[in-house]
Amino acid sequence: LVSLILTCILPQMSGTITKLEIQKRNKERVNVYLDEQFSFGVMLSVALELKKGQVLSDADIEQLKQQDNRHKAYQRALNYLSFRARSRVEIERYLRDKKYDPDVIAATIERLDEAGLVDDTAFAESWVANRERLKPKGARALRYELQQKGLSETAIDAALEQIDESELAWRAIEKKVRQWQALDEDGFKRKAMAYLSRRGFDYDVTIETVERAWQKVTSEQTG
């Protein structure tokens, strides 16, 4: 009785492919018609396995839909990576937000890994190098940023090993010196200390850099 009720409620998915049609709005997807009726859509790469006259069982269709879902997840991940490099955890979070199942996410990460498109060590090094070039920050701030990206402490330590925090602190404050040069010594140093502290620089490095900056101001004023 239960099977009879389910048969009445649930549509029969199996059938013979009578038509394969590229979608008008998305040329990368194909509509599949079974027994002259639209049944489901799949990515073009998945549809390449299909041909007119082919008989599909319910299990075949379910497998095709799973393939299609994995392919869509991979394409979404590639698009996400097209804006900038991402950490493994960032990609996992993104796909989870898009409601993909854990097994689909794991398969996507594995495929990206095999293609060399996800490498947390390289990502950490790239992130730090980018910060050094465009927006110098201290090791404390950089560590926090990388932790937020889900990177391991090993990858973070390796990336931060290469930085010269004193040089970064000087580059961070150098352009500000001219803006603050009209301040007295106390005002200048308080301003500079707060600025470097907010950017995550070590206390000793901050003190050293502030003194260096103030000496630059006084030498220019007396020179």
Image (cartoon, rainbow, N blue to C red):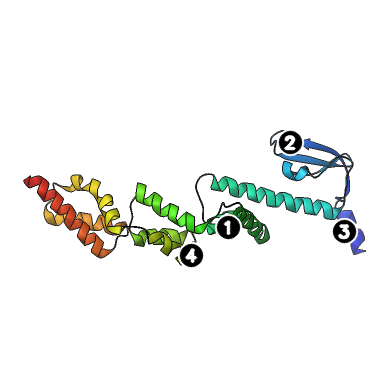
Front position among marks 3 and 1: 1
Q: Earlier in the sequence, mark 3 or mark 1?
A: 3
Q: Marks 1 and 4, how far apart in space? A: 15 Å
Q: Is residue 50 above or below residue 111?
A: above
The structure residue drawn at horizontal position 10% and vertical position 49%, both measured from the top left corner, is 219
Give the x, y percent position of residue 214: 15, 53
- Observer-nearest of 114 and 44: 114
Under mark 3, the amino acid is Leu
Residue 214 horizontal side relative to residue 49, left or right = left
* Amino acid at the residue labelled 2: Gln
Q: What amino acid type should be assigned to the residue bearing mark 1?
A: Glu
Q: Quadrant of the C terminus?
A: top left
Rate crowding at label 3 as few (under 14), some (14 to 19) or many (20 or more) other CA atoms within 10 Å.
Answer: few
Q: Which circle, 2 or 1, is nearer the viewer?
A: 1
Alpha carbon separation for disc pair 3 and 4:
49 Å
Q: Residue at x 79, y 54 (%)?
A: 62
In 3D space, how far apart are the residues under numbered discs 4 and 2 (Cα atoms)? 43 Å
Residue indicated by mark 3: 6
The residue that label 4 is drawn on is 152
CB atoms of marks 1 and 4 within 8 Å: no
Q: Residues within 10 Å of mark 4 (few under 14, many from 20)?
A: few
Q: Position of residue 199 (x, y in %)?
A: 31, 56
Q: Residues within 10 Å of mark 1 (few under 14, many from 20)?
A: some
Q: Which residue is mark 2?
A: 23
Question: Going by the image, does 197 lie left or right of 111?
Answer: left
* Of the pair 192 and 212, the residue shown nearer to us: 212
